[in-house]
Image (cartoon, helix red, strand yellow):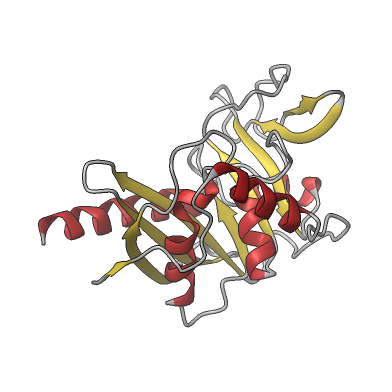
Amino acid sequence: MGIIGVPAGWPADQETALDVQRELRGRLVLDEEGPAAGTGHVTGLDVAYDDERDLVAAAAVVLDARTLAVVEEATAVGRVSFPYVPGLLAFREIPTVLAALDALTADPGLLVCDGYGLAHPRRFGLAAHLGVLTGRPAIGVAKNPFTFAHDQPGQDRGDFAPLLADGEEVGRALRTRSGVKPVFVSVGHRVSLDNACAHTLALTPRYRLPETTRHADALCRGALKEALAT
């Protein structure tokens, strides 16, 4: 597997990246319901880093949304394409994630990112960024809370509490397993928040994290390990 370089013209500094982020945010589509949960394909996306060698490995795993069986998987390894700047983390990994997506032959369907979409200081996290760039419906399901305020949801599976930013609901803390800490769901592109939560529950029949994330996490870690061994 070759190492993907940083694309020509990719933002190299914070000011340029902020300009790109603002321009792309204007293309967000937030008034579509999106595909129904349990239909079509869903694709999990995740990355793993090796900071010493400045590498990032990305995985894209397509699942059948009804059975959660793996349909196809692909990986890519590239150079980290941007410095670490909170709020601009998508710029570090998107070229490699797009390469993994491009390697798929199956229709990816809904993109499920291990991260945030609208629940972002400038309302444009990884799920929103990838959704706009690909034109595909996308959601973010994060393991850990960001800076937004939220109450604890009820203890039952399906209970949720809004993630709030200045009184605006930008996502939800969603309980996917009764009595287990919630995940944090936000809209990326072309999906409603209710539907994003429905997809998340459909993808978590046994575990706290979506099956998309579980598969993609294992796959990108394996790809990084393989790249470091060469």
Disc count in the image? 0
Residue situated furthest bottom in the rendering: 105
Q: Is residue 205 above or below residue 145?
A: below
Q: Is residue 46 above or below residue 39?
A: above
Residue placed most toward the observer, 194 or 47: 47
Image coordinates of residue 113 in percent, x first then y, are: 55, 51
Which residue is painted at 55% across and 24% down in the image? 181
Which quadrant is home to the C terminus? bottom left
Residue 108 placement: quadrant? bottom right
Camera sees residue 33? yes
Image coordinates of residue 92 in percent, x first then y, are: 46, 49
Camera sees residue 38? no
Give left or right: position of 44 versus 150.
left
Q: Is residue 4 above or below residue 174?
A: below
Residue placed most toward the observer, 34 or 48: 48
Residue situated furthest left in the rendering: 230
Which quadrant is home to the N terminus? bottom left
Give left or right: position of 76 versus 117.
left
Image coordinates of residue 63 in percent, x first then y, are: 50, 66
Residue placed most toward the observer, 13 or 162: 13
Which residue is painted at 70% across and 24% down in the image? 148
Give left or right: position of 96 versus 223.
right
Which residue is painted at 50% across and 41% down in the image? 209
Which residue is painted at 58% across and 55% down in the image? 112
